[in-house]
Image: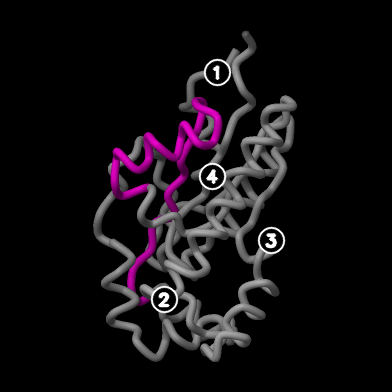
Amino acid sequence: MPVPADVWVVAGPPGAGKTTVARVLLAALTPTPALLDKDTMFGSFVEYILTSSGRSIGEREGPWYDEHIKVHEYWGMTATAKQIRSFGCPVLLSAPFTQQIHHLQRWQSWTQELGGEPVRLIWVRSDARTLRQRLDRRESERDEGKLANFDAFIGSMNLDTEPTAPHTTVDNRLSAEGTLAAQVTGMLAGLPRQE
């Protein structure tokens, strides 16, 4: 039985630079994976659900969002990734995935839901100062809730805790040494080749 196509997961807090890291990674990988970005896939749908439920469109964190929206976003991304890779096409998923990456048992279950190994996690490291600057700069309505309750948001992101899932770290803090391209190139050079 053939080994399923690779799954790449680019995870980290909102504003960490996942989109930028994903672009660098997509440019470096052959064959190029199909990109499944949470905001691209579900952005307008999430806005509609929040508005029709009388919620702020900036409410992208917290128990209500997790229960009524995020669970469906992540289920949709997982099912789509599994289907795509079943046809031999690698997939790159980009989203925070905070719970999946910081709980090993949850990571293992999710890996099975994705269709099994190989699943490679790239964690985009950030810090509070970097996130504040990037969220302020992008001036997105979807960040209003995060900025209004910034300390609670930062506390929920596990910024100082490495994922318990097997991973490679890409440092995208303002204080990071080395470019993202150099970090991704070095990361790929150190990975075992998949047959």
Q: CA distance from mark 2 to mark 3?
A: 20 Å
Nearer the camera: disc 2 or disc 1? 2
Q: Is residue 105 above or below residue 150?
A: above
Q: Which mark is residue 193?
A: 1
Question: Which residue has dot 2 on it?
Answer: 64
Residue at 51% across / 82% down in the picture? 143
Q: CA distance from mark 3 to mark 1?
A: 30 Å
Q: CA distance from mark 3 to mark 4?
A: 29 Å
Name the quadrant of the C terminus: top right
**Is residue 186 toward the left or the right of residue 64 in the image?**
right
**Is residue 79 toward the left or the right of residue 14 in the image?**
right
Q: Amino acid at mark 3?
A: Met
Nearer the camera: disc 4 or disc 1? 1
Question: Which residue has dot 4 on it?
Answer: 182
Residue at 48% across / 26% down in the picture? 191
Q: Nearer the viewer, residue 80 or 5?
A: 80
Span highlighted in magenta in the image: 101-129
Q: Quadrant of residue 104?
A: top left
| Label 3 CA crowd tier, 10 Å (few <14, some 14–19, many 20+) | some
Question: x, y (%) of residue 8?
Answer: 56, 39
Q: Amino acid at mark 4?
A: Ala
Q: Amino acid at mark 1?
A: Arg
Task: Identify the mark nearer the N-term, 2 or 4.
Answer: 2
Q: Nearer the viewer, residue 153 or 44?
A: 44
Question: Which residue has dot 3 on it?
Answer: 41
Q: Is residue 131 above or below residue 112?
A: below
